[in-house]
Image (cartoon, helix red, strand yellow):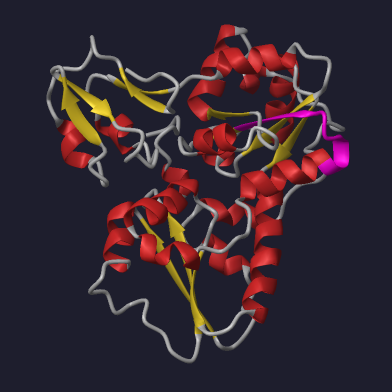
């Protein structure tokens, strides 16, 4: 049992139904000592096994305790909140969510979508200068891991642009100081791998479920909070970056940096595997640039494995 990796098995709860084995898109689960164990070297942290486990034996590492300790430091800590929060905390005013997070101890709340807008600008500029070829988005950490592990011939086709959350953390540190802490909240499990690999940028990645439980443990009901007019997202509200949460959203923000660029969106690792298979003709190009927006979760991040709503 490896509790240091973002996804693990509670062996006492595992009933050997093998549902996770059957549904894992990369076959990263092996039966060991009578229990289905996640193999980190093969896993891409897509969270599918967590979704399908009928007894919740597959779990996502909970980093709330580490976040509490981070908030006890003298340096201010900022929350980076994924754009899909509007579908998770339905009908909740932004001001109420911000106040709830401030009650937990966060110095400010900012939208990860600001980082997405930076990614779009950088990717658009990259495509304008690039020559003909296939280019794969780097926005989804599970996709990047999948390409490196299971379609290595396309590894060099992944753009070198930082992901939205890492771009966002760089922005926050530039504005508020390198010494600040940054905690991400969203429906994604693979973001935990990003925080583990880039602690100098992203301190921790928590799920929306973590946030919901954390607020409940502090008896904070964001829906019952009286918002204050001057409480707002910092440094500003995001605009088009919010559409990154749905399939095709990134492509919609690129604004066609050139008539020789073609766009393709694919979501779901099974579909990505088919697209990048050796016998696929979909990624064969000659005199144009093909940009592929890839997301591990079918339909986009709004369907992430750690979402609150069904």
Q: Position of residue 191 (x, y in %)?
A: 52, 38
Residue 288 covered by magenta stretch:
no
Task: State whether residue 102 is above or below residue 48.
Answer: above
Q: Position of residue 72 (x, y in %)?
A: 75, 11
Tell me if 128 is positioned left or right of 213 in this view.
right
Q: Position of residue 83 (x, y in %)?
A: 60, 44
Inspect this view and state whether residue 299 appears: no
Task: State which quadrant residue 35 falls in.
Answer: top left
Task: State which quadrant residue 65 falls in.
Answer: top right
Task: State whether residue 237 is above or below residue 154.
Answer: above
Q: Nearer the viewer, residue 291 or 94?
A: 291
Tell me if 63 is positioned left or right of 233 in this view.
left
Question: Looking at the image, which residue is at 31% across and 67% down?
Answer: 275
Tell me the magenta residue range.
Answer: 174-184
Inspect this view and state whether residue 125 appears: yes
Q: Nearer the viewer, residue 203 or 214?
A: 203
Q: Position of residue 62 (x, y in %)?
A: 49, 19
Q: Nearer the viewer, residue 155 or 242?
A: 155
Question: Looking at the image, which residue is at 75% across and 22% down?
Answer: 106
Rendered-image quadrant of the N terminus: top left
Q: Residue furthest bottom?
A: 287
Question: Looking at the image, which residue is at 46% across and 53% down?
Answer: 144
Numbered disc total = 0
């Amino acid at each position: 049992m490896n509790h240091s990796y973002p996804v693990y098995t509670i062996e006492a709860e595992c009933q050997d139904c093998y549902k996770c084995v059957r549904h894992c898109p990369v076959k990263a689960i092996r039966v060991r000592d009578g229990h289905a164990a996640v193999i980190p070297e093969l896993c891409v942290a897509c969270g599918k096994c967590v979704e399908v486990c009928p007894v919740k034996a597959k779990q996502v590492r909970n980093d709330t305790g580490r976040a509490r300790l981070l908030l006890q430091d003298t340096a201010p800590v900022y929350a980076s909140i994924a754009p899909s929060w509007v579908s998770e905390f339905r009908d909740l005013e932004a001001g109420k969510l911000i106040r709830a997070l401030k009650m937990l101890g966060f110095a400010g709340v900012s939208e990860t979508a600001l980082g997405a807008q930076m990614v779009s600008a950088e990717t658009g500029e990259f495509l304008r200068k690039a020559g003909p070829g296939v280019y794969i988005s780097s926005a989804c950490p599970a996709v990047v891991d999948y390409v490196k592990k299971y379609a290595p011939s396309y590894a060099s086709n992944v753009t070198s642009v930082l992901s939205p959350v890492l771009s966002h953390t760089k922005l926050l540190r530039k504005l508020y100081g390198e010494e600040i802490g940054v905690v991400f909240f969203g429906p994604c499990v693979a973001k935990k791998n990003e925080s583990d690999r880039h602690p100098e940028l992203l301190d921790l990645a928590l799920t929306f479920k973590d946030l919901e439980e954390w607020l409940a443990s502090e008896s904070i009901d964001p829906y019952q909070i009286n918002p204050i007019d001057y409480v707002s997202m910092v440094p500003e509200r995001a605009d088009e970056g919010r559409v990154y949460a749905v399939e095709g959203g990134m492509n919609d923000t690129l604004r066609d940096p050139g008539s020789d660029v073609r766009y393709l969106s694919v979501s779901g690792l099974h579909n990505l595997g088919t697209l990048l298979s050796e016998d696929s003709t979909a990624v064969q190009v000659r005199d144009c640039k093909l940009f592929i927006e890839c997301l591990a979760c079918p339909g986009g991040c709004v369907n992430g494995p750690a979402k609150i709503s069904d």
